[in-house]
Amino acid sequence: MRNINKLTRPQIQSMLTYIGGLNGRNKGRKKDLKMFYHPLTPKDVYVKYTSFAVEPDNSIYSEVVVKCIKSDGKSEDCIKQFDNLKQRMGFESDFLEIDLDGNGNLIFV
């Protein structure tokens, strides 16, 4: 069965807004920020990155963030939908990396 879906304008705007807002957030560092498509959820797109920061007590804080952006432009934390790491890793193994060109058109990387 073939799925044909198009990113919506609210979805594209939400992706750009979310990514643009990461630059000024806390003093931490963002690493490996990428956008993804998943064939099992063709109407959604995903933003994934790792966030690092040094805490006041000199400990290191790190977090892998995966945001799901729905076709209406709303985003939610995708990690909470999985019961364990094995389920999450299985889902993420089918991610296809995407990007947006200068006109907001989807391209596969």
Image (cartoon, grey):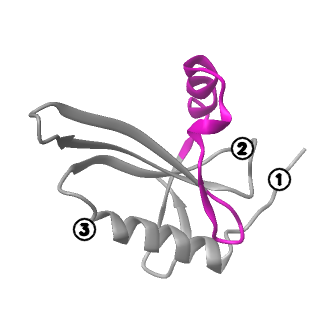
76 vs 68, nearest the viewer: 76
| Residue drawn at point x = 44 percent, y = 67 percent | 18
| Residue drawn at point x = 11 percent, y = 35 percent | 57
Mark 2 / mark 3, whichever is N-terminal? 3
| Residue drawn at point x = 71 percent, y = 72 percent | 72
Please give the range of residues in magenta: 69-96
Q: CA distance from mark 2 to mark 3?
A: 32 Å
Left or right: 100 in relation to 45: left
- Above-or-below relation of 4 to 95: below
Mark 2 / mark 1, whichever is N-terminal? 1
Q: Which residue is mark 1?
A: 3
Looking at the rendered structure, the kind of residue marked 3 is Gly
Q: Nearer the viewer, mark 3 or mark 1?
A: 3
Is the residue marked by circle 3 packed among few (<14), some (14-19), or many (20+) residues within 10 Å?
A: few
74 vs 15, nearest the viewer: 74
Looking at the rendered structure, the kind of residue marked 1 is Asn
- Using the rendered view, name the quadrant where residue 43 is placed: bottom right
Find residue 24 and name its label.
3
Q: Which residue is mark 2?
A: 39
- Expressed as whole percent of the image width and height from the top left, the position of residue 9 reads 64, 80
* Pointer 2 with pointer 3, Cβ within 8 A: no
* Pointer 2 with pointer 1, Cβ within 8 A: yes
- Expressed as whole percent of the image width and height from the top left, the position of residue 44 reads 68, 56
Q: CA distance from mark 3 to mark 1?
A: 37 Å
Dot 2: element: loop
Looking at the rendered structure, the kind of residue marked 2 is Pro
- Using the rendered view, name the quadrant where residue 70 is placed: bottom right
Q: From this viewpoint, which residue is outermost toward the front?
A: 57
Dot 1: element: loop
User: Does residue 90 belong to the magenta stretch?
Assistant: yes
